[in-house]
Amino acid sequence: MDASLQQNLFWAFAAVQVAGLVSAALARLAENRSIQASFQGLFLAAMSLVALVTVASIAMGWTAWVLSGATLALMVVMAVWDPGLRTAS
């Protein structure tokens, strides 16, 4: 039973990380479209969930919190990075 619980926790953890990254990509791709606000809301919800999972992983003493922290950082970078922005020379 304990092994099954740990396996389920692992897959739930992995699903949260993937959902966070997908929501960041969708929020970026929906920019300047009518559905932008919905995807931004999804992104904020997913970011909150990833943050909660990170804190829970730290509290449980699970070293995979580093992966969750990296997901948070990547989500922030995806949200603020603008590849089309050019600076004047």
Image: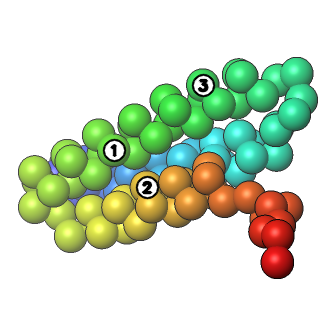
Q: Residue at x 82, y 46 (%)?
A: 29
**Mark 1 = which residue?**
51
In front here: 24 or 19? 24
Give the label on residue 41, or none.
3
Give the label on residue 89, or none.
none
Is 67 on the left or on the right of 27, as rendered? left
Q: Earlier in the sequence, mark 2 or mark 1?
A: 1
How many marks the image carries: the answer is 3
Q: Are marks 2 and 1 in contact (CB under 8 Å)?
A: yes
Q: Is residue 14 visible?
A: no
In front here: 66 or 7? 66
Q: Is residue 23 above or below residue 13?
A: above
Q: Residue at x 11, y 53 (%)?
A: 60
Q: Specify the amino acid type for callout 1.
A: Ala
Q: Is residue 40 visible?
A: yes
x, y percent for residue 16: 47, 46
x, y percent for residue 73: 45, 61
Give the label on residue 72, or none.
2
Q: Label 3: state its secondary structure.
A: helix
